[in-house]
Image: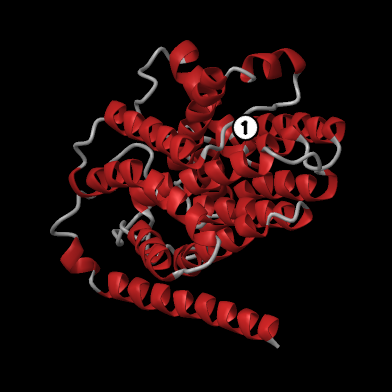
Amino acid sequence: MYYINENVHYLFELFLYFLISLCLLILLIKTNKFQKKYYLETLSKPQNIHEFSVSRIGGLVIFFILVIECLFIKNFEKTLLMDIFISSIPVFLAGVFEDFTGSVKPKIRLCASLLSGFIFVTISSFSIKIVGVQFVDFFLSFELVSILLTVLAISTVINSFNIIDGLNGLSLGSSILMLITIIFLSIETDNYVLKNTLLVILIPIFTLFLFNFPFGNIFIGDGGAYLLGLIVSTSSVIISQNNEIVSPFASLLIIAYPFYEMIRTIVRRKFFLNTKVMMPDNQHLHSLIYKYVLKKYDGPINNNAIASLLTLSLPLFCCFWVILFFKNSFVIIIGLIIFLILFEIFISKFSKL
């Protein structure tokens, strides 16, 4: 009977967080005209593909719900939730200030993401110690190397989520797929603290997705994108360590889409376009797909949503592959290779206008 009462109480908490998220989102949408006085419009930026102005501070809802959850959750999940929340503060604030002022330099936001990664590793004691490659694992046995690599990995994923945040539902949908996959892995490895923590975090993300996709009634902004990146990256680090069931490559495949988009963008700008690495452009995969869909299927349909669904097929493939084969490193590596081939096929296909 006690177990049943605990489950009912937990479900009630989740429903309560959903209602609070719902009310906050409706409030933000209804007050968009007032908000526009205080934050910078981005319709003229090269990476922007939206035609009208909507609220860009939806990420505040996720952050606010995290605050509430940290204050009122009284079980074992609170410690991990607090670790994720506290580590998110530097990069989230940097993103929010950029949303409102447009004056936070990319280098400052990069430093904030590195700081967030360092805080997480420091207060949680989680770091990457095994990647499944023997000589790399040898170097990771040194604590300093492990910490530095983990901080760099977390920072990379944080910034990659800001890159893919360009279509309705793309960054939110990607994070939902990834977090659901990590929740599945946490159940398989009996890591119920991680499972329960991610479930409460997933509530405001999913609620925001309902308003963001397909019509883009509210955006998450840089602050929200960075926050999603931190949540996904830290969760990936946790699930990849301290268990012998999940392949070390599983976490890499889970975050492969935004991670590879980030690495590919750096290489493209630095070595092929000879431009600044942090200079925004409209040559990301989702941008190319959107332009392709807009030209081929222009009409009374939501081209933005169609392009988003096409792009989401990549993280969907990665997550589905992990769920099927998370125990087998060789098959996971095959999945990574297939993903890379699919990504480049997509780039080749949708860049031909």
Q: Is residue 207 above or below residue 264?
A: below
Q: Residue at x 51, y 36 (%)?
A: 157
Q: Is residue 265 above or below residue 90?
A: above
Q: In what quadrant of the picture does the N terminus appear?
A: bottom right
Label 1 crowd bin: few (<14), some (14–19), many (20+), radius 10 Å: some
Q: Is residue 172 visible?
A: yes
Q: In what quadrant of the picture does the C terminus appear?
A: top right
Left or right side of 231 for 33: left
Q: Is residue 21 above or below residue 193?
A: below
Q: Residue at x 62, y 80 (%)?
A: 6
Which residue in the rendered view is the most extreme toward the bottom?
A: 1
Which of the pair 218/7 is nearer the observer?
7
Q: Is residue 308 visible?
A: no
Which residue in the rendered view is the most extreme toward the left?
A: 37
Which of the pair 201/225 is nearer the observer?
201
- Identify residue for label 1: 347
Q: Amino acid at mark 1?
A: Ile
Which of the pair 257/132 is nearer the observer?
132
Which of the pair 263/5 is nearer the observer?
5
Location of residue 35 (image quadrant): bottom left
Locate residue 36, reporting x and y percent.
Answer: 18, 60
**Colouring method of the image:** secondary structure
Left or right side of 310 for 95: left
Q: Residue at x 67, y 56 (%)?
A: 183
Which residue in the rendered view is the most extreme toward the front?
A: 2
Locate residue 270, reporting x and y percent.
Answer: 44, 14
Location of residue 108 (image quadrant): top left
Q: How many marks?
A: 1
Numbered disc 1: secondary structure: helix
